[in-house]
Image (cartoon, rainbow, N blue to C red):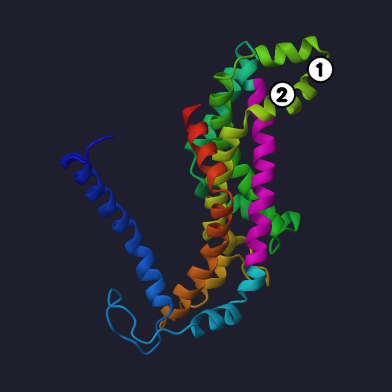
């Protein structure tokens, strides 16, 4: 058995301290979400008379039911399209020989360097001309175009480390390139697919500016925009804001706890690859 040394005690103390640092914002969030509007005490001080009425009021006033449905729809649809399109685009970039794959990969890499804010006005005009303003499809289209370069970058790096012998064996058995990709290559991409799904889902779920721009004036809102209506120019209902934020993170937490092992394995495997 290993002895409990001073070094072990120091490492445990550091980890406990790090855990407290990360847990402190969560404590503030939950503490203020159960505090009454007339309570002006310090945010750090525990709420003496907690109430759950803030959650009911935030749910009703912000229309969080429909906002959660919209956020889930946009996130799921966007992530699915990003995964399929990025994996299929990265496959020839990683396997083909010659100059064109290098130049094509460079074009995708340039997409990582260009700020998305540069295209906000022309993209808004394009969405308007297509009649997609006020629709969640405008967000799906925007997120796919924005996040595919990053996802292709991850998939290509992972595929270059995967031996090509698997596809050669499938070709000997009579598989064409398309069937070999979906039957052999795509299952091998599960680790990096977990990384791509987690990173994109978190970004899309928490994004505020794009839904505010494309869904402004419509009844369809995502959760961040729905919560934002509690903040005005002269007054802000912070107790409702924090209650809405707690509600908004519950779906992500539930999904994480249900898929905790797969997410951790996929994320670690994707980074390793």
- Side (left or right) of 14 relative to 30: left
Answer whether residue 83 is magenta in the image: yes
Residue 11 makes an appearance in the image: yes
Mark 1 and mark 2 residues within 8 Å of each other at the beta carbon: yes
The local crowd at label 1, few if under 14, some if 14 to 19, many if 20 or more residues have their Cα within 10 Å, is: some
Residue 125 can be seen in this image: no
Labelled disc at residue 175: 1
Name the spot of residue 66 as percent of width and height, x first. Answer: 67, 70
Look at mark 2 in the image and give the residue it sits on. Answer: 184
Q: Earlier in the sequence, mark 1 or mark 2?
A: 1
Give the vertical position of 107 relative to 35 (above or below): above
Q: Nearer the viewer, residue 226 or 27?
A: 27
Q: Main secondary structure of the magenta part?
A: helix
Relative depth, front residue between 265 and 121: 265
Question: For the point 53% across and 51% down, which residue is it?
Answer: 202
- Front-most of 10 and 146? 10
Q: Which residues are magenta?
A: 68-92
Kindly give the residue lying farthest to the right in the view shown: 174
Q: Looking at the rendering, which quadrant does residue 11 occupy?
A: top left
């Amino acid at each position: 058995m290993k002895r409990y040394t001073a070094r072990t005690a120091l490492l445990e103390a550091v980890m406990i301290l790090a855990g407290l640092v990360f847990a402190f914002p969560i404590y503030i969030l939950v503490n203020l979400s159960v505090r009454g509007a007339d309570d002006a005490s310090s945010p750090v001080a525990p709420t003496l008379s907690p109430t759950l009425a803030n959650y009911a009021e935030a749910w009703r006033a912000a229309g969080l039911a429909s906002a959660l449905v919209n956020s889930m729809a946009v996130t799921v649809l966007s992530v699915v399209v990003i995964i399929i399109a990025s994996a299929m685009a990265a496959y020839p970039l990683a396997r083909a020989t010659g100059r064109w794959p290098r130049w094509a990969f460079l074009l995708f890499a340039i997409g990582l360097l260009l700020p998305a804010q540069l295209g906000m006005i022309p993209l808004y005009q394009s969405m308007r001309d297509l009649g997609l303003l006020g629709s969640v499809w405008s967000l799906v289209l925007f997120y796919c175009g924005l996040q595919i370069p990053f996802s292709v970058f991850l998939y290509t790096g992972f595929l270059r480390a995967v031996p090509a012998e698997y596809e050669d064996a499938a070709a000997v058995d009579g598989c064409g390139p398309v069937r070999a990709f979906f039957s052999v290559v795509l299952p091998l991409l599960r680790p990096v697919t977990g990384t791509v799904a987690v990173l994109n889902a978190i970004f899309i779920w928490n994004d505020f500016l794009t839904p505010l721009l494309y869904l402004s004036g419509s009844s369809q809102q995502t959760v961040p925009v729905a919560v934002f209506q509690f903040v005005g120019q002269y007054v802000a209902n912070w107790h409702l804001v924090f209650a809405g934020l707690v509600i908004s993170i519950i779906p992500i937490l539930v999904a994480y706890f249900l898929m905790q092992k797969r997410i951790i394995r996929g994320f670690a495997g994707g980074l390793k690859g």
